[in-house]
């Protein structure tokens, strides 16, 4: 019915309940997973869910590829295709396509098999809701632009298979595209941008965003037992943005940063409850001064919350304060790590940095900045940190 690629053969050999497929561009990972699921479900009675971050992503990606595959295989029957709900019945197997932002689907009916496409754009909470309702096995795929929850929560754990595929595993790749990708290897010797692109898109290995604002930080496994709490920063959110609480510690003359809260839809009473369950309750918390009502309400719960004094050009000044000092980040601070890797300077059309940070990937970092503004200015030498000179 079709000639399998090396990527398909490798994917077909995965056996664990959770199957993580990391890969570069044009590796055919999504296409191969779909081919496998179609063949697997052809003579079975299954319910298979295919999920991405949004409907537009599905329509131009996995959903489009699925229809393309079954059409080429001579299996497409329009009478079996519910285009409104994006459901297709292949013999006795149902394939459904929906987005991870559809909360009714996340907590809805169970399924036999789950495929999370471009999983790095789907929250860990959404994955957990879906995976816990999956009976047989789950596939995930993604381009490794930066570490995310698959690396911290899944890979290397029991019951998880991990695979890296590249363009070299796709024998049917157009020669022009193949040559273009191969050309990046030579360019990588002279440019950090091409080095990262070759590493991520060519070799399917983890990379970082080019031009990241914060570079002098390292990840540590956990917070040392005797670390001393300096304080916390709090950035409010609700519908579109998460509420973020970041705690900062001192240990052996170094700064350690720990993510405490990173969640949308929290009421102030819920924020207070989460703080009371964490060590942050023992220290001062500097919150966004643009939310005086929320600050007052948190104080009414007995928490030591004060407004941050921002001042003129406080964003860039706060960034400079953070840049002046190396720091460590706990491995459980997943959202903070993602922001650190993706928070970059805006650039003009020629790629020149403008000295203005992007207004994205900055919720946890705003909370961190509030703490630095109030505790790590020149007036804070008494904290005994190893400041860079």
Image (cartoon, grey):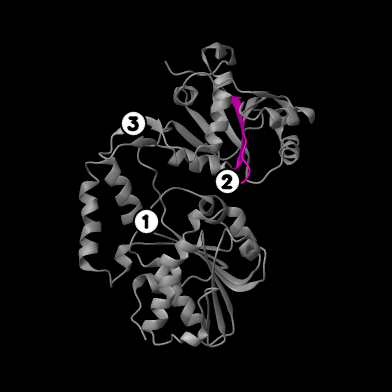
Q: What range of the chain is rendered magenta?
A: 234-251
Closer to the chain start, of discs 2 and 1, is 1
The CA distance from mark 2 to mark 3 is 27 Å
| SS at badge 2 | loop
Quarter of the image with the C terminus is: top left
| SS at badge 1 | loop
- Residue beneath disc 2: 240
Disc number placed over residue 81 in the picture, else none: none
The CA distance from mark 3 to mark 1 is 30 Å
Q: Is residue 152 left or right of residue 11?
A: right
Q: How crowded is mark 3: few (under 14 residues within 10 Å), some or many (20 or more)?
A: few
- Residue beneath disc 3: 354
Q: Which residue is drawn at 39% across and 47% down?
A: 207
Whether residue 35 appears in magenta in the rendering, the answer is no
Which residue of the protein is positioned furthest toward the right in this rendering?
A: 301
Residue 307 visible (yes or no): yes
Residue 10 visible (yes or no): no
Q: Position of residue 41 (x, y in %)?
A: 52, 82
- Residue beneath disc 1: 204
Quarter of the image with the N terminus is: bottom left
Which secondary structure class fits the magenta region best? strand
The residue lying toward the viewer, choosing from 42 and 74, is: 74
**Residue 372 versus residue 57 in the image, above or below:** above
| SS at badge 3 | strand
């Amino acid at each position: 019915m079709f000639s399998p690629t090396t990527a398909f053969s490798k994917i077909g050999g995965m056996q664990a309940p959770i199957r993580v497929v990391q890969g570069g561009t044009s590796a055919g990972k999504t296409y191969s997973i779909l081919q496998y699921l179609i063949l697997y479900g052809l003579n079975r009675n299954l319910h298979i869910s295919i999920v991405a971050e949004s409907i537009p992503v599905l329509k131009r990606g996995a959903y489009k590829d699925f229809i393309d595959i079954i059409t080429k295989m001579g299996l497409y029957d329009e009478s079996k295709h519910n285009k409104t709900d994006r459901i297709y019945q292949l013999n006795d197997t149902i394939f459904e396509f929906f987005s991870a932002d559809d909360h009714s689907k996340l907590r809805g009916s169970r399924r036999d098999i789950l495929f999370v496409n471009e999983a790095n754009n789907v929250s860990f909470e959404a994955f957990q809701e879906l995976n816990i309702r999956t009976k047989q096995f789950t596939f995930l795929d993604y381009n490794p632009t930066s570490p995310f929850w698959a690396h911290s929560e899944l890979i290397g754990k029991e019951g998880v298979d991990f695979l890296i595929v590249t363009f070299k595993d796709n024998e049917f790749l157009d020669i022009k595209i193949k040559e273009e990708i191969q050309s990046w290897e030579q360019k990588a010797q002279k440019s950090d941008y091409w080095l990262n692109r070759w590493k991520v898109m060519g070799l399917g290995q983890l990379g970082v965003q080019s031009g990241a604002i914060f570079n002098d930080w390292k990840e540590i496994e956990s917070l040392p037992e005797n670390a001393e709490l300096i304080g916390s920063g709090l950035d409010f959110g609700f519908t579109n943005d998460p509420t973020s609480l970041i705690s900062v510690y001192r240990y052996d003359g170094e700064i350690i940063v720990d993510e405490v809260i990173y969640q949308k839809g929290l009421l102030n009473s819920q924020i207070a409850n989460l703080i009371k369950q964490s060590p942050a309750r023992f220290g001062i918390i500097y919150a966004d001064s643009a939310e005086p009502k929320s600050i007052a309400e948190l104080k009414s719960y007995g928490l030591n919350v004060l407004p941050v004094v921002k001042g003129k050009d406080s964003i860039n000044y706060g960034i400079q304060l953070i840049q002046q000092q190396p720091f460590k980040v706990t491995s459980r601070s997943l959202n903070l790590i993602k922001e650190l890797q993706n928070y970059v300077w805006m650039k003009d059309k020629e790629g020149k940095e403008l000295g203005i940070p992007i207004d994205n990937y900055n919720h946890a970092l705003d909370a961190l900045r509030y703490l630095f503004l109030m505790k790590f200015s020149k007036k804070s030498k008494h904290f005994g940190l190893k400041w860079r000179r």
